[in-house]
Image: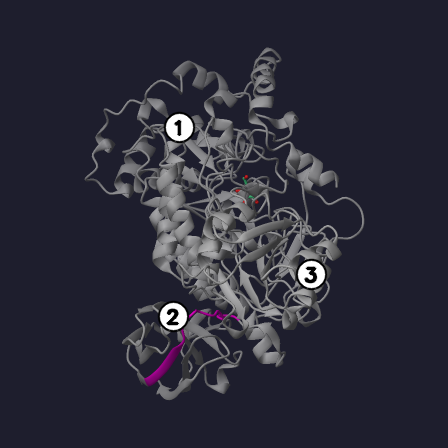
């Protein structure tokens, strides 16, 4: 509770700005002013940067340009680039006295005006730009990231990133803090909606394409939270214990693929520790794997308050501390002067920040505030949601609803007359029609599903019931042709879900409504899997996730059949939390969590551990291996048409090519996500199968297409902890193709050497 209160501070920039200006003056009077404070007052950061320098030549490489600037910099200027300058709402005791240089976002890093290096203005931007209302603007809320993952569509992910990149710049930001890709090892994790599901290949491909396109808008891209920040409970003190092999083949593989595709300017290290060392001072993660093995050229930015040391963190590979300078300000300077951090090591951090500034185009393309194309972007948000909502059940072809035949519709749900649910925490977007929300506030994005539905079915009598009294909702359902229940599960950063059950008696509500009218359609607005004790009794279920600013419109287009759904689950929906690898969420001991202390002082130590003993068995790999039946498998999703698979031919080579044919056997146009899995030889010691590729195939009624999926060697390899490398285990591999991880009609065995 205390933790939540403290975090609530992180919202109202306008309310606090006066305080910061005052605080700045007071700090100055008291003589606490940092060197940078005086220095930048002197140089005037807001003065237009001097652009008349040899490194402004765009034909030089980012590395050459960074090296040239680095040679000109003083020690103080170098230190300036390695830490943030505060964040609205961060504890006042440590607030930096130069808030006027910020843009209202989560943080900013000073530039070097005399050398033409701009301020880095950072904003959270998971499913849209967060800090916009502070800025006098609104941003487009896209569907939750997990929804984008459900599209399995790299073009949709690219469109998603493009919208965010453009809106960031229009609001004066040149760095995103989006790009969450922690694997869904723990579906109760309160940030599951910000991530991309349970499979490393799917998650990595999508976050990579999203961030590549976002960064193409000339913002510094980011992928986070590196790594194994797979639950929020005790996130500052938890030590995630996991074997090297499991780490490399699961959680880190998602990052490896994402970083490889996007080449992001930054990677954010996470709050938790991994195998004993905090992620932001973990040499294995930051230097050995990220920078050396994967060749990451950008900089490592700490999560907010995730830095816990100077010398150790610097040596481990942390480049930039956020949001302040507790360890990478005066202490880093002193460590350099005392020879505890060498000048080459310091320069390496600075070079990385500079390189990203050049590589991502923020030096060559200074931001200019402008008006975001809200209408255009809303249309994109709607299209992405239409490709992201997963049809889970459709008994007797209840959907799409025939607008000519349906005369009366009951719309039921606590917020169905208001808007669609959205995810909270630093991911929250200030979208059109909503006031700026606190850090952990439940926000419902208009338009109202009830009104939108009425507009789509003008001839039908649409009546609303909040469901507060299940009996009255049931009575309305009984007297209506169909009932649509909008059910939700709210998630936010800084908390985990106690279970996977719909809250506030919604299960009971759905039971009552379905008992009154079997033509009950449940629209789920959740950020993660939920259990469905009523599943057998309802007619249809659509998982809409958090649908974004145009969520209601997209859902109605699916319900009335204007859009044929094509999305597939990016995570398993288990039958019960009892079936999870950890039926009990592992929590910190009784008493306060360390969050408060961390924010003020940076002090923290791991106080408890989560042992990820299930290792490689994340998501469907767990249920497959343990032979546990599930509610809905990974990769599952229905369409209004049907598809048939045939003609599998696998050709082994440097890349293995998987060829097959998909036919639309139904009567309407649709898109099928055709999934390819591989079972490795038994001697590899792997779970029964893994996703190795997929293709989204658009097909007219009756049409067939030949599909070819290339599978790189890495996707068929295992990580060998002993030799610290990937290896392909020679032997017999079974390739499986079909429409979900449990409907794989085609099989073929091939020998790989
Ligand atoms: C979150 C990050 C976020 C940062 C800045 C942290 O609490 O974990 O994801 O980018 O705050 O708001």
Q: Residue at x 35, y 70 (%)?
A: 668
Local crowd size for mark 1, using a 10 Å CA cut-off: few (<14), some (14–19), many (≥20) = many
Residue 334, labelled with which disc? none
Label 3 vs label 1: CA separation? 48 Å
Query: Looking at the figure, which quarter contains the C terminus?
Result: bottom left
Q: For this view, does 552 lie left or right of residue 360?
A: right
Residue 672, labelled with which disc? 2
The range drawn in magenta is 634-647
Say if disc 3 is inside 8 Å of ligand 1.
no
Q: Are marks 3 and 1 in contact (CB under 8 Å)?
A: no
Could you say where residue 271 lies in the image, as x and y percent from the top left?
60, 48
Q: Is residue 149 above or below residue 615?
A: above
Report which residue position mark 3 lands on: 501
Local crowd size for mark 3, using a 10 Å CA cut-off: few (<14), some (14–19), many (≥20) = some
Label 2 vs label 1: CA separation? 48 Å
Could you say where residue 185 lies in the image, as x and y percent from the top left?
59, 63
Which of the two labelled residues, at mark 2 and mark 1, occupies the earlier sequence position? 1
Local crowd size for mark 2, using a 10 Å CA cut-off: few (<14), some (14–19), many (≥20) = many
User: Which residue occupies the foreground of this view, 527 or 408?
Assistant: 408
Secondary structure found at label 2? strand
Quadrant in the picture for residue 708: bottom left
**Residue 319 in magenta stretch:** no
Q: Mark 2 or mark 1, which is nearer to you?
A: 2
Which of the two labelled residues, at mark 3 and mark 2, occupies the earlier sequence position? 3
Q: Residue at x 62, y 52 (%)?
A: 190
Residue 104 visible in the current orientation:
no
Give ligand 1's quarter of the image: top right
Report which residue position mark 1 lands on: 111
Could you say where residue 280 lies in the image, as x and y percent from the top left?
55, 47
Query: Looking at the figure, which quarter contains the N terminus?
Result: top right
Q: Mark 3 or mark 1, which is nearer to you?
A: 3
């Amino acid at each position: 509770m205390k933790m939540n209160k403290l975090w609530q501070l992180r919202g109202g920039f306008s309310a606090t700005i006066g305080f910061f200006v005052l605080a700045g003056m007071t700090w100055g009077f008291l003589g606490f002013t940092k060197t940078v404070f005086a220095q930048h007052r002197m140089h005037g950061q807001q003065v237009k940067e001097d652009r008349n320098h040899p490194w402004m030549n765009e034909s030089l490489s980012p590395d050459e340009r960074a090296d040239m600037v680095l040679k000109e910099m003083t020690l103080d200027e170098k230190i300036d680039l390695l830490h943030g300058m505060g964040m609205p709402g961060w504890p006042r005791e440590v607030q930096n006295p130069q808030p006027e240089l910020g843009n209202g976002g989560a943080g900013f890093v000073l530039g070097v005006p005399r050398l033409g290096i701009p301020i880095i203005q950072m904003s959270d931007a998971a499913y849209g730009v967060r800090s916009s209302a502070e800025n006098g603007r609104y941003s487009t809320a896209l569907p939750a990231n997990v929804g984008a993952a459900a599209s399995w569509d790299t073009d949709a992910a690219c469109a998603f990133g493009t919208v965010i990149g453009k809106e960031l710049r229009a609001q004066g930001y040149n760095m995103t803090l989006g790009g969450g890709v922690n694997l869904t090892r723990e579906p109760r994790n309160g940030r599951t909606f910000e991530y991309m599901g349970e499979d490393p290949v799917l998650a990595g491909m999508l976050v990579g394409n999203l961030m590549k396109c976002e960064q193409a808008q000339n913002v510094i891209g980011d992928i986070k939270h590196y790594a194994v920040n797979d639950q929020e409970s005790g996130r500052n003190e938890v030590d995630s214990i996991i074997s090297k092999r499991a780490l490399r083949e699961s959680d880190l593989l998602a990052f490896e693929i994402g970083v490889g595709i996007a080449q992001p300017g930054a990677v954010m290290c996470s709050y938790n520790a991994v195998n004993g060392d905090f992620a932001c001072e973990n040499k294995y993660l930051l230097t050995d794997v990220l920078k050396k093995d994967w060749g990451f050229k950008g900089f490592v930015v700490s999560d907010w308050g995730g830095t816990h040391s100077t010398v150790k963190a610097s040596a481990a590979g942390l480049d930039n501390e956020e949001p302040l300078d507790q360890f990478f300000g005066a202490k880093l300077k002193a460590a350099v002067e005392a020879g505890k951090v060498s000048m080459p090591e310091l320069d390496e951090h600075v070079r990385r920040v500079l390189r990203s500034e050049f590589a991502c185009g923020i030096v060559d393309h200074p931001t200019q505030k402008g008006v975001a194309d809200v209408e255009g972007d809303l249309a994109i948000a709607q299209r992405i949601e239409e490709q992201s909502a997963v049809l889970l059940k459709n008994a007797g072809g209840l959907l799409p609803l025939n607008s000519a035949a349906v005369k009366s519709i009951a719309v039921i749900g606590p917020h169905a007359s208001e808007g669609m649910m959205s995810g909270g925490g630093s991911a929250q977007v200030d979208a059109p029609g909503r006031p700026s929300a606190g850090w952990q506030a439940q926000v419902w994005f208009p338009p109202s599903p009830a009104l939108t539905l009425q507009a789509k079915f003008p001839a039908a009598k649409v009546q609303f019931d909040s469901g507060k009294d299940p009996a009255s909702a049931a009575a309305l359902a009984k007297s209506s042709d169909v009932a649509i229940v909008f059910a939700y599960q709210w998630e936010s950063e800084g908390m985990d879900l106690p279970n996977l059950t719909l809250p506030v008696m919604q299960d009971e509500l759905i039971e009552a409504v379905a008992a009154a009218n079997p033509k009950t359609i449940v629209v789920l607005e959740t950020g993660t899997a939920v259990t469905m004790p009523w599943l057998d009794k309802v007619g249809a279920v659509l998982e809409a996730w958090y649908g974004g600013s145009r969520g209601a419109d997209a859902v109605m287009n699916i319900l009335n059949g204007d859009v044929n759904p094509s999305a597939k689950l990016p995570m398993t929906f288990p039958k019960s939390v009892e079936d999870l690898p950890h039926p009990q969420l592992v929590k910190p001991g009784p008493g306060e969590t360390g969050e408060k202390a961390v924010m003020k002082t940076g002090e923290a130590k791991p106080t408890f551990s989560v042992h990820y003993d299930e290792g490689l068995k994340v998501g469907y790999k767990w249920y497959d291996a343990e032979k546990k039946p599930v509610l809905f498998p990974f990769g599952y999703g229905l369409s209004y048409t049907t598809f048939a698979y045939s003609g599998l031919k696998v050709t082994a080579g440097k890349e293995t090519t998987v060829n097959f044919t998909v036919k639309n056997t139904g009567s309407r146009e649709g898109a099928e996500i055709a999934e390819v899995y591989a079972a490795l030889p038994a001697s590899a010691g792997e779970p029964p199968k893994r996703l190795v590729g997929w293709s989204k195939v658009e097909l007219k009624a009756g049409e067939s297409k030949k599909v070819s999926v290339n599978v790189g060697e890495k996707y068929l390899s295992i990580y060998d902890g002993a030799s610290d490398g990937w290896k392909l285990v020679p032997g017999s591999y079974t390739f499986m193709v079909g429409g979900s991880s449990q409907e794989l009609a085609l099989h073929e065995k091939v020998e790989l050497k």
